[in-house]
Image: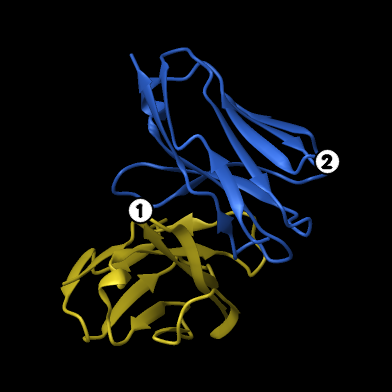
């Protein structure tokens, strides 16, 4: 079974631009969560989707948004990029909304210049 | 109240040693406490997890000790190996398992 696939693997953007990151969950998994990982703030929860509905949202500004499609694939979007948005963005999937085990992808490394 | 405090920040042990990583929390609503292991260039992977009604859980060389009254839990790695060198994160959640609050992480190096 293929794991969680995140694309692209690396991304370089400039301040003010917007970016879209993609996540394909493990086949059959219906829940997708997004996390931001930085050296200073560690791993922080962004949001979670299940069956195309946002279930939970972390404490991030409205510039961060996401969505989930009917095939469970998910995208997250960051608008008006700031230097502080440079981070590893991790996607995790699980079979249901209350699964005990999250399966993480290898992430998208975003650099904002 | 949502924080999970993890220590130490980094740890170096010799092969065969028993590294111990500690975490503390404030939110008594937390009801699930997983540990994740992350290697460079990879996403975190679930290692072991515990619920507050259990004081200890073992899986292979990994053991979680849980002290509900002190709101603390720790990870012990028995007979540590160089392949265990990684960053370890404790986490906690309540109600829904997919919104995890992570500790800051511990970078473990096991020397041969």
Residue topped by disc 1: A39
Residue topped by disc 2: B69
Task: Say the numbered circle drawn on residue B11.
Answer: none
Give me the residue at 61% from left, 51% from top: B4
Res B6 → quadrant: top right
Secondary structure state at the residue bearing disc 2 = loop
Chain A takes which shade in the image? Answer: yellow
Tell me which chain the residue with mark 1 is part of. A
Relative to A52, say whether B9 is above or below.
above
Residue A93, image x, y percentages: 50, 64
Relative to A15, say whether B17 is above or below.
above
Horizontal arrangement in the rendering, residue A43 relative to residue B26 (left or right): left
Residue A104, image x, y percentages: 44, 57
Residue B47, image x, y percentages: 54, 40
Secondary structure state at the residue bearing disc 1 = loop
Residue A27, image x, y percentages: 46, 66
Mark 2 nearby-residue class (10 Å; few <14, some 14–19, many ≥20): few
Horizontal arrangement in the rendering, residue B107 relative to residue B104 (left or right): left
Give me the residue at 80% from left, 42% from top: B68
Res B100 → quadrant: bottom right
Chain blue in the figure, letter: B
């Amino acid at each position: 079974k293929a794991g969680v696939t995140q694309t692209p693997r690396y991304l370089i953007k400039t301040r003010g631009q917007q970016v879209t990151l993609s996540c394909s969950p493990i086949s059959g998994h219906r829940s997708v969560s997004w996390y931001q990982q930085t050296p200073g703030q560690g791993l922080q929860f962004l949001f979670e989707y299940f069956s195309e509905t946002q279930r939970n949202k972390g404490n991030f500004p409205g510039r961060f948004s996401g969505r989930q499609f009917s095939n469970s694939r998910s995208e997250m979007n960051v608008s008006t990029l700031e230097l502080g948005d440079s981070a590893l963005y991790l996607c995790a999937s699980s079979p249901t909304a209350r699964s005990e085990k999250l399966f993480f992808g290898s992430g998208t490394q975003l650099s904002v210049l | 109240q949502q924080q999970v405090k993890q220590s130490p920040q980094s740890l170096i042990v010799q092969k065969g040693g028993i590294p111990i990583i500690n975490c503390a929390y404030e939110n008594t609503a937390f009801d699930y406490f997983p540990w994740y292991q992350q290697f460079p260039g990879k996403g975190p992977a679930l290692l072991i997890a515990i619920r507050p009604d259990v004081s200890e859980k073992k899986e292979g060389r990994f053991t979680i000790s849980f002290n509900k009254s002190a709101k603390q839990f720790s990870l012990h790695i028995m007979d540590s190996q160089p392949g265990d060198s990684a960053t370890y994160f404790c986490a906690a959640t309540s109600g829904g398992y997919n919104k995890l609050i992570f500790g800051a992480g511990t970078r473990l190096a096991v020397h041969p």
